[in-house]
């Protein structure tokens, strides 16, 4: 799905910033020069030029790269990010306000978490937002946060801007996260159990199985083989909920080796949608590859194409159950 939220961020954020500037009280004569002002004036207007986000810590570096209207994780095989997470971070930086200078003493910078991130033991994070030519739009070291849960008091974060030896206490929420896994859009699919009308299970080395409803809303039954023992309702329900709130543990390019194929299943859903699920196992890891057919297929395949998703090993019973698993007593 093509998203344009970030491209529109500059204008909307600039408008909100302008209104805030108009309404904010001016600092009194005792305030330090710059107190109450935006930490990064004009940032909102430059956000549409952003092409690369870098968050560097002493032990790791996170990169988020723009590709057209998408933002990707180069170190995670260019998997798409949760763009709402990026939007929240950039909006926070655009609206961040300087409150109080905190000096430039090196020992104090370390206590505030705004020293050099490469220093052993440093807790600082250095953030850079670059344009397509590699020129910095913003460069800042972000340190410790102070979050007050009562009194509706805004969050405070310590910062040190590039080229500025002095640290500042700044007001605003900066949801910083240097873990690439936290940036990944982990939702794979969410089709309620009642949408499943028929499931054709073809596990390699086993007889085909079919589960079906006589009509929408009717119970899901084991129809093939017709003479099977009494099915386990819990096992049938697990199949029905196989695509409900489905998330992944990791996502790898489909072309990579994902172990031994186990078989495939075809889930026929209401609305004429069919989902093909190909399963494979590598050691104790289960991978699935999904393909959609029908009215909703275009947007689904745009997300799924080219990826193999590692899911919980327990999902094998939902996508490729054995006859014994479907008929054994609860």
Image (cartoon, rainbow, N blue to C red):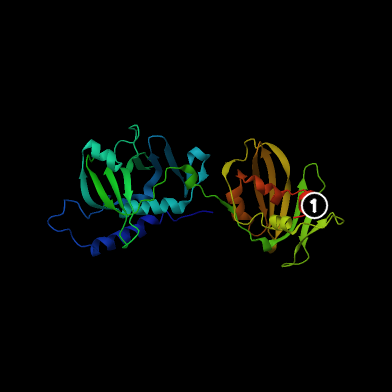
Q: Where 124 sits versus 157, above or below?
A: above
Q: Is residue 95 visible?
A: yes
For residue 221, side relative to residue 141 (left or right): right
Give how far across and how far down residue 70 sits, in percent: 48, 48
319 and 197: which one is in front? Answer: 319
The quarter holding residue 164 reads top left
Give how far across and how far down residue 138 sits, in percent: 32, 44
Q: Residues within 10 Å of mark 1 (few under 14, many from 20)?
A: many
Q: Residue at x 23, y 36 (%)?
A: 106
Circle 1 sits in a helix, a strand or a loop, which is it?
strand
The quarter holding residue 58 reads top left
User: Considering the image in quadrants, where does the N terminus appear?
Assistant: bottom right
For residue 118, side relative to residue 314 (left or right): left
User: Considering the image in quadrants, where does the C terminus appear?
Assistant: bottom right
The quarter holding residue 161 reads top left
Q: Is residue 41 visible?
A: no
Give how far across and how far down residue 101 sits, in percent: 20, 47
Q: Where 245 sits versus 73, above or below?
A: below
In the orientation shown, which residue stands out farthest toward the front?
A: 330
Tally of numbered discs = 1
> Which residue is disc 1 drawn over?
209
Q: Residue at x 45, y 54 (%)?
A: 84
In the orientation shown, which residue stands out farthest toward the right?
A: 227
19 and 51: which one is in front? Answer: 19
Give how far across and how far down residue 182 sits, in percent: 48, 46
182 and 139: which one is in front? Answer: 182
């Amino acid at each position: 799905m093509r998203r344009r939220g970030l491209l529109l961020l500059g204008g909307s954020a600039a408008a909100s910033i302008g209104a805030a500037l108009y309404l904010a009280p001016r600092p009194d004569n005792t305030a330090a020069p710059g107190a109450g002002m935006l930490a990064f004036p004009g940032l909102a207007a430059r956000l549409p030029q952003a092409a690369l986000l870098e968050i560097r810590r002493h032990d790791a570096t996170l990169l988020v790269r723009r590709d057209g209207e998408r933002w990707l994780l180069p170190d995670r095989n260019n998997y798409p990010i949760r763009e709402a997470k990026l939007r929240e971070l950039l909006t926070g930086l655009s609206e961040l306000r300087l409150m109080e200078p905190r000096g430039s003493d090196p020992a104090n910078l370390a206590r505030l978490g705004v020293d050099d991130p490469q220093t052993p033991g440093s807790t600082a994070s250095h953030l850079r937002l670059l344009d397509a030519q590699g020129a910095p739009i913003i460069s800042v070291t972000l340190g410790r946060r102070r979050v007050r849960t009562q009194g509706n008091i805004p969050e405070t974060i310590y910062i040190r801007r590039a080229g500025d030896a002095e640290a500042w206490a700044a007001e605003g929420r900066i949801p910083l996260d240097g873990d690439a896994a936290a940036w990944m859009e982990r939702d794979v699919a969410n089709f309620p159990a009642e949408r499943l009308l028929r499931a054709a299970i073809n596990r390699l080395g086993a007889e085909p199985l079919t589960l079906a409803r006589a009509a929408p809303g009717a119970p899901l039954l084991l129809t093939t083989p017709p003479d099977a023992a009494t099915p386990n309702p819990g096992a049938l329900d697990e199949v029905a909920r196989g695509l409900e709130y489905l998330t992944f543990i990791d996502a790898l390019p489909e072309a990579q080796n994902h172990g031994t194929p186990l078989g495939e299943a075809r889930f026929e859903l209401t609305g004429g949608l069919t989902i093909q699920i190909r399963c494979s196992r590598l050691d104790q890891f289960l991978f699935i590859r999904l393909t959609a057919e029908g009215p909703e297929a275009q947007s689904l395949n745009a997300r799924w194409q080219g990826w193999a998703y590692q899911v919980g090993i327990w999902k094998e019973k939902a996508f490729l159950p054995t006859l014994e698993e479907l008929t054994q007593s609860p």
